[in-house]
Image (spheres, helix red, strand yellow):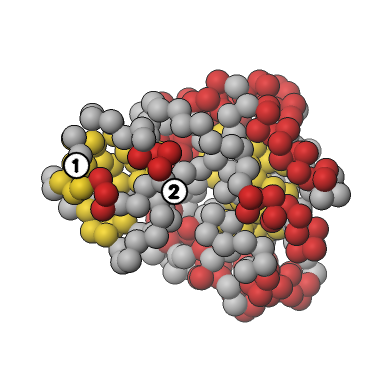
Amino acid sequence: MDKKVRIFGTLGPACRDRETLTEMFSEGMDGIRLNLSHTGLREAAGIVQTYQEAARACGVIPELLIDMQGPELRIGSLPQPLLLQEGRQIGIGEIPFPEIVRAHITDGRELLLDDGKLLLKAEGEKLLVLRGGLLESRKSVALPGCTIPVPAMTDADRENIRLASDFGVTAVMQPFVRSREDLAAVRGALDEADCRHIRLLAKIENRTGLEKLSELIPCCDEIVIARGDLGNAMPLWELPAAQKSISSACRGAGRDFMVVTQMLDSMTHRPVPTRAEVSDIFNAVLDGASSVMVTGETAVGEHPAAVIRFLSRTVRAAEAYRDCLPL
């Protein structure tokens, strides 16, 4: 019998109270992700304490995964959310891009914002909105096909690693892993902080990570198939094959892997999932996933406890089916 698949949610405004977190643990949650792109461990001390209190109330020893800033690029702060209307142009200067990104915005270059929800194309000193919506501060920016040299870790990442043990962190998620050197830098920071017991998870989010997978697998404790940004790096119809390829490589190497992104996306606003989402979770377990995780569904969604219920029950049903299959 294979080991139990772990269930993870994501901390956020929708699940920051003890009552909701307690219900999520009761529904089968094993641990939670804290996204440090917008905050730090010190600033999140209150919600982390509430999370740990809820776990104790349920008799659970909780996992706490911190998702680092890493080499992901983000825009700066906006005075107010910016409505980008499809078919309209805006000046490049209206969006506070980091200088390193601004230098790579050349005529004809496409830009993906907010995990690919928004798509713009450079036309001289203007940006044409190809896929519009509301842009808020500190959202991600990616330039498909363009490699921008940035370090694996930020100063904030190093500070959060120094604090990790004090806050009960059990794993570090390194985003946009590009090479074994990226993982070695994080391992080194963990060693320096006397955090060798903390697991290192490598997020595969671009073609570089996918191409270097064989060298990354031995350098981490778990691979994360992060389908959000990975889906931005290729045509969406190629993403399922990429997921299957990563799953197969991890199984062959005996390396744990996690599947994440939009597993129950419809439940951000609906009380029940789609049939396709349930099938996606079920098949991830059959492919050998060691853990599954939801993000915005619990962080900002309207039904965080129900999300964990459907995620957990679908995983358990998949495990029961898997364990009855002939060898």
- Marks 1 and 2, how far apart at CA: 19 Å
> In terms of depth relative to the viewer, which is nearer, 21 or 177?
177
Q: Is residue 42 left or right of residue 75?
A: right
Residue 271, quarter of the rendered image: bottom left
Image quarter of the C terminus: top right
Left or right, 183 with respect to 81, comes to right
Q: Is residue 305 left or right of 271 when viewed as pictured?
A: right
Q: Is residue 158 above or below residue 187?
A: below
Residue wearing tag 1: 126
Q: Secondary structure at mark 2?
A: loop
91 or 181, which lies in front?
91
Residue bearing the label numbered 2: 74
How far across and down, in percent of the image, does residue 300 sit? 46, 65
Callout 1 secondary element: strand
Image quadrant in which you'd find residue 254: top right
Residue at the spot 76% in from the left edge and 43% down from the top edge: 189
Front label number (1 vs 2): 1
Q: Position of residue 293 (x, y in %)?
A: 58, 50
Residue 17's label in the rendered image is: none
